[in-house]
Structure formats: structure tokens, C-alpha cells
Image (tube, coloured by chain):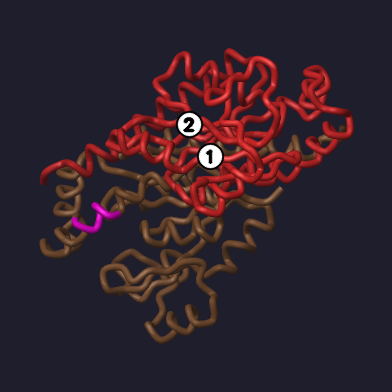
Chain colours: A brown, B red
Amino acid sequence: MKGILFVMSGPSGTGKGTVCSRLLEREKLNLSVSATTRDMREGEVDGVTYHYVTRDKFESMIARGDMLEYADYNGCYYGTPKKSVTTLLEDGKDVLLEIEPQGALQVKKLFPEAVLIFLVPPSMAELKQRLLLRGRESEEEISRRIDASQWELRQAEKYNKIIVNNDLDACVDETIAYIAGVRKERKLIEQLMNEEI
Amino acid sequence: MKGILFVMSGPSGTGKGTVCSRLLEREKLNLSVSATTRDMREGEVDGVTYHYVTRDKFESMIARGDMLEYADYNGCYYGTPKKSVTTLLEDGKDVLLEIEPQGALQVKKLFPEAVLIFLVPPSMAELKQRLLLRGRESEEEISRRIDASQWELRQAEKYNKIIVNNDLDACVDETIAYIAGVRKERKLIEQLMNEEI
């Protein structure tokens, strides 16, 4: 049985990264490491957090069609090397991708069977507060991200599941319950397809 | 707020029609009446069960692009006039379509925000038994439908939700709970989009 491709996405600041880390601790999911042209941040590890590449290298990967999805997001490229994902799926391993909304929708077009989870904040005021508190971006940059989230929210209907990240533990539990439900559905379909009648 | 488009589909004999009738009794959902070229069956009403039209008429509707989806299924055309659906949605009314799997996937391509529910039998043996019992089709026709369901099951991953129709009441309850969840998600997104910050 082929693996399932889970894609975790949502507006910047909703806590995708933290939720994914928790999922990986508790669930049998394989992370596909993305490539990016953005600078490495403190605590990040090349080849683990991201593959950090130059714009030239990234653009040649795009040109060769090696990217499952990519986006120019906040002035940097982010993308998912295609092969790393398909190899895992064909091995029967479930994959978890954490990507921003533009990329998530690209993946859904290529893999309509991908399961897209859209993480949202309890309110936009809360989202802004979180972005301000983490202090990673300028106020202008934060305003730009809040603006971008309007478009992203309009696309939410294309996702398989919307989950609110209010309380982290509850959010992770809900995601795990959802993943379990999807796995059960896929197993059931597999059984029906293999039934001899 | 725009209405939500729910599409109920699944292999022939899984009980789509019965489940939809129950849903309409219990939920605020609007049925879009499909057009078909198949003969009217006992108990069916023109303009209510289906719009019964000739092949010529049906083909001219296709040619004018008036069909949201259509399929040549078991030798007859079945289709959904586009306008009847979009008018309801723009009025803020949730729509329920009951269509066979080919058509359901066509709708998903045109309306990625449509919510596709795939109804499956508890087993293929049970499905065959139900088709035999209802005695509507010949044994050859039943075999053809069972064969077609293999392709249909392979497309199940493209649906938003898979529900087993084992016990009718439980199946209807599960569908209603799922619909309630989707409505809640859409309302939440709407709130986030309208929030002033």
C-alpha cells in the first residue's frame, strides 16, 4: 500500500513548525526536507531543517523539473524536491510536508490524493501578536504577512481539513485524530479493492 | 457568506439516493435536480427526481456549456445544469448533489471548494448482494458495475470524506456530523477574513 502525503500549511505565524515537530514525535511520519535560499537561522541545521542552496542552484532545480512545489515567499525561494517525496510514498511511508499555502496548493494540483491540513490562528489579532512576539520580522514585514493571509484564508476551502491552533496540545491531538481517520479510510478502500468476489 | 457545495457519490448500489433523502429531511440542504436521458422509473417524478430529456436536448446543453458535469453512465447521460447550482450557492444556500463518481470528480475540478463525500459498502460482496436484491439490472450489468467500482475506488483518495454505509442510521448520522464540521470550518474562515485588526 502506497504511503499517504500529508501537507501542513497555514498563514505565517500559526505554528506549523511546532505542530509538525510534535506530530513527528508521536506519529510514524516521514519528513521531506525542503530546499530554501533563505539564510540559516540560529539552531537550524543544513540538510535537516532545510537544504540551504543558492538562488542559482534553486533555479536550475526548477528548470530541471525537480521541484514538487516551490514559491518565492518573502523574497526567498522555498521548495520541495520531488524525488524525496515520491520515493518515500512508493515505499509505503507516510510523508509530512510543512509548506506555505502557495506551495500546498501546487502539491494538491499534482497530487490530488494529498491530504492538506490548514492551520489557522484563533483570531487575526492573536496571529499578529504572535508574529510581533517572536520578533523575527519587522513591523512592515508583519503587516505584509497579515495582508498575505487574506488570500491564504480565501483558499482554505481547497484544503481537506482546517484546524485551529489555539491550545497547542489540543491542536496536536486533533491533528493526530484526523490523521488516524484518514489512514483508516485509505485502509478500508484498499481492502475493498483487494476483495475477491 | 456563499453556500457550500456537498457532493454525494460512490459506486452504484451503495445507497447514495437513500442517504441523500434522509439528509434532506434532517438538514438545510438544497437539491439541484439533475438531467438525464434514462427512462423514468416507477415512483419518479419529472423535474423532481430528474429532468428527463432526450439525447438531442442533452447534447445541445453540453454544447452550450450549460452542464456543470455530465457522464455517459450505463448507456445514459446524467448531468447537472450549472446554473441551478451556482444560483443557490450565491444565495448562501448549501447544495447537495448526488452524482456518480465520474461526474463528482468533474465537479471537484471546476469547484475545488466542493466537499466530496464518497459512500462505500462494507464489502464488495455486500454491494453485489444489494445490486442483485434490488433486481433493477441484469447479472451482466451488475458485473459491469462491480468492475467499474474498481476504478471508482481508486479515485476515492480525491474525495474529502469516505463514509461506510453499513447501518443506514449510523451512516446518515456520520454524514450529518461531517457536514456540521465542514460548516463550522467555513464559518471560522469567514470570521477570520472579516476580522478588523
In the displayed orientation, state which residue is furthest to the bottom.
A56
- Chain of the residue where label 2 is placed in the rendered structure: B
The answer to whether residue A34 is left or right of residue B159 is: left
- Left or right, A120 with respect to B172, comes to left
Across and down, in percent, residue A90 comes to: 68, 58
> Between B162 and B62, which is closer to the camera in this rendering?
B62
In the rendering, at what x and y percent does residue A22 appear?
42, 45
- Residue at 75% over, 36% down: A191
Segment colored magenta: A147-151
Disc 2 secondary structure class: loop
Left or right position of B118 against B64:
right
At label 1, which amino acid type do we have?
A: Thr
Whether residue A61 is situated above or below residue B160 in the rendered picture: below
For disc 1, the neighbor class at 10 Å (few under 14, some 14 to 19, many from 20) is many
Vertical placement of A137 versus A180: above or below?
below
- Which residue is painted at 78% across and 18% down in the image? B134
Name the quadrant of the N terminus of chain B: top left
Disc assigned to residue B32: 2
The lab-note entry on whether marks 2 and 1 share a chain reads yes
Dominant SS type (magenta): helix
Q: Residue at x 47, y 38 (%)?
A: B115
- Residue B102 placed where, x, y %? 64, 45
The answer to whether marks 2 and 1 mark residues whose Cβ atoms lie closer than 8 Å is yes
Residue type, numbered disc 2: Ser
2 or 1: tag closer to the N-terminus: 2
Which chain is disc 1 placed on? B
Q: Is residue A86 above or below residue B4?
A: below
**Residue at the spot of label 1:** B80
Question: In the image, is residue A148 part of the stretch drawn in magenta?
Answer: yes
